[in-house]
Amino acid sequence: MAAEIITAKSLNLWYGTDGKTSASDRGHHALKDINVNIPARQITALIGPSGCGKSTFLKTLNRMNDLVPGVHIEGEVCFDGQNIFDKTVDTTWLRKQVGMVFQKANPFPMSIYDNVAYGPRTHGIRNHSELDGIVEKSLRDAAIWDEVKDRLKKSALGLSGGQQQRLCIARALANEPEVLLMDESTSALDPISTAKIEDLAVELKEKYTVIMVTHNMQQAVRVSDKTAFFLLGELVEFGDTDKIFSMPKDKRTEEYITGRFG
Ligand SMILES: Nc1ncnc2c1ncn2[C@@H]1O[C@H](COP(=O)(O)OP(=O)(O)OP(=O)(O)O)[C@@H](O)[C@H]1O
């Protein structure tokens, strides 16, 4: 059995607390007592109807929710055995380890090369040949090197949507993360670009742990090893993807995957 890389224990999150801490008026309870062990070097899909807390859970894993005013979090999330909410944890370090790719590709308005070199430069790497090596490796790992190797100094904004999304994956990989979070990263793409990103995710799990939010259940079946089904802020069921989709344990999971709601 694969070792876990991320463990959530009694994780609860409220939005809109406005500084209130009494249990009765803490705002919207978006994550309710989540307990889960996410295995390393596998793909975990987060599924569930709109508004059930998938993105909130994903963003909690690299503390992106810290940036939302009025959020209150209780419980633990351990990354490589360390609670990410400990005061000693540097969020810049955490976000380097746990990188993120968003729903809509968001390349910086600069060259393809500079997009990928951005993170390493921020972390102090200045040597040209070292940066060249990181840029090439990251673009190769993101399966876009052959398409861009002759235009590295051209603007990233000239790439197609699917290429931009793979560039954003390369930009995240340049930081040498252990975990890659993907928040509906193919929902804005055509089927061919989607297939490329799905194939890429499967290749990436040799070196990285991938956690992806998806609305597309076929996608979860095609690419993921584990599936987590969320409903109204609860993690209803977590397990092997083939079991979740063939023999769900919970009636609510069965109803969702058979299309009876959502
Ligand atoms: N910044 C925020 N402030 C207040 N409430 C929020 C915020 N972000 C999300 N919520 C609420 O928390 C709940 C969970 O939202 P979340 O985005 O995690 O759901 P989701 O499952 O990812 O949905 P979708 O599939 O539509 O993206 C929703 O009720 C949402 O309205």
Image (cartoon, grey):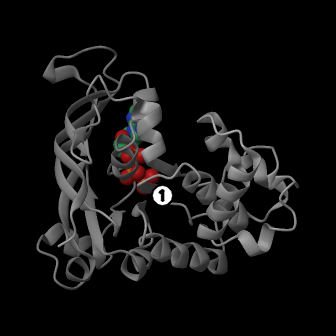
At a point 27% along the width and 77% down the height, the residue shown is: 241
Relative depth, front residue between 116 and 255? 116
Residue drawn at x 30%, y 14% as measured from the top left: 19
> Can the viewer see residue 64?
no
| In this picture, residue 235 sits left or right of residue 116 | left
Q: Foreground: 217 or 60?
A: 60
| Residue 10 found in image quarter | top left
Q: Which residue is under mark 1?
A: 182
The secondary structure type at the circle numbered 1 is strand
Residue 131, image x and y in percent? 70, 50
**Number of marks drawn:** 1
Q: The C terminus lies in which quarter of the figure?
A: bottom left
Please state, as top left, top right, bottom left or bottom right, where the N terminus lies in the image.
Answer: bottom left
Residue 239, percent across and down?
Answer: 19, 70
The amino acid type found where label 1 is placed reads Met
Q: How crowded is mark 1: few (under 14 residues within 10 Å), some or many (20 or more)?
A: many
Q: In this view, does 69 lie above or below 28?
A: above
Q: Can residue 215 be seen in this view?
A: yes
Q: In which quarter of the image is residue 108?
A: top right
Decide which of 167, 19 is in the foreground and name it.
167
Residue beneath the point at 48% across and 58% down? 182
